[in-house]
Amino acid sequence: MANYASAVLNTAKYKVDEMMNRAEFKAKPSTALMKYLKNTQFLIPATAMEAALATKATDQQAVSINLLNKQSISTVSARAAAHTGSINDSRATTVTFTTYGAKFKWSYKGSDRSIWALSEQVAAQIRSAAIALHSAIETALLARLNTYKSQVVVSASPRGGSWDGTNFIFGIDNTDFGYWMQKVKGFMRQQYYTDTMEAVVDETLFQEFQRIANQGAGNASNLAFQVGGVTPGVTEELTLDAGYVGQGYIFPVGSVGILPWIPQLNRQGFGSAGELGGEYTTIPDPLGSGLTFAVHMYQAGADNNSAAGETQDVDVEVELSVDLGPVEADSSTSNLTPIFKFGVLT
């Protein structure tokens, strides 16, 4: 039954505790989102982020981030008295924001005939909305990693694996499954990336990472030496390309980030649910991502007699939302990024 009708107080009823209710409110991992949030401080300095968000007055306004180009400089074999060079250039990247919203409603009298307190009902709805938002954001960011993966490599014949120049995937031979971290780090070194790496991987590769990371030093086949320098996180919705038993994305620390934004009226706080136009406010993400959601609420009279409420009732319509602008470090070379897709071949 919908609208809490199953909890109407017509018989003696029990309420489950929070532990038992956790199974209902399970949420898929938000690994890609947390990687983007974690690395924002490296990719986008705090001053640049504050400036970008301060100048973005509406959800229609664009934001750009400026980057310096690596200059192409020719070397010489002899000194010159009147040497000449060229001036470097820079480029601007426009940040595309996407709005993610989730809506629900509750009524003032919705708990009068129920075993559930109004605060419990609304708290459950807020958590449900946050779970829905996280799911949509995670799907979008995983698709973005795939879109922005590099199509360019230093060599089309990398050592330690193979390069699929059609689908742009670094392939690791199945016989090297237990060495996937070493192989992919070696591939990144061949792209001239020697920094600490972040990775988003599927369940198969993550389980192998856990097995390797927890091998004892006295084990004759100890493979834990390769764990350092890469931090994998597991995702449960990465669809494998044909011919792979496990896949993921790898990129240097600080090469992705995300700009969160909510409207100024929400940040300031305005109105109330009972006023014309409703209330604009904020709420921290209850799932602990560190994001702040914009909240808009307005109310209207309703007949909720058949929905565990009363004939004369008041509905409160609620929307949680956030605008997110993902950013990936790019290059002045077309289709070259520091994000690479890789996988273990069948």
Image (cartoon, rainbow, N blue to C red):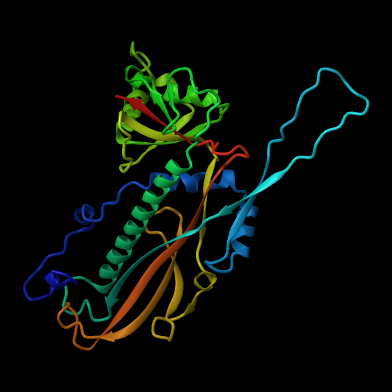
Q: Residue at x 72, y 35 (%)?
A: 71
**Residue 203 horizontal/vertical position (percent):** 30, 35
The answer to whether residue 287 is visible is no
Foreground pick, 39 / 109: 39
- Of 175 and 227, the residue lying toward us: 175
Residue 187, visible in the rendered structure: yes
How many labels, in total?
A: 0
Q: Quadrant of residue 345?
A: top left
Question: What residue appears at the point 57 percent right and 41 percent down from the top-left corner?
Answer: 330
Quarter in which the C terminus is drawn:
top left
Say if 236 sits above or below 6 in the image: above
Residue 205 sits above or below residue 266 on the image: above
Residue 318: x %, y % from top left: 35, 73
- Residue 68, position in %: x, y? 68, 43
Residue at 54%, 47% in the rendered image: 40
Residue furthest toward the bottom?
312
Q: Nearer the viewer, residue 205 or 190?
A: 190
As drawn, the residue found furthest toward the left would be 11
Q: For the view shown, which residue lies furthest in the front direction?
A: 166
Q: Which part of the image, by quadrant, shows the N terminus? A: bottom left
Q: Nearer the viewer, residue 1 or 247?
A: 247
Picture residue at 41% right of the left edge, 73% below the top: 296
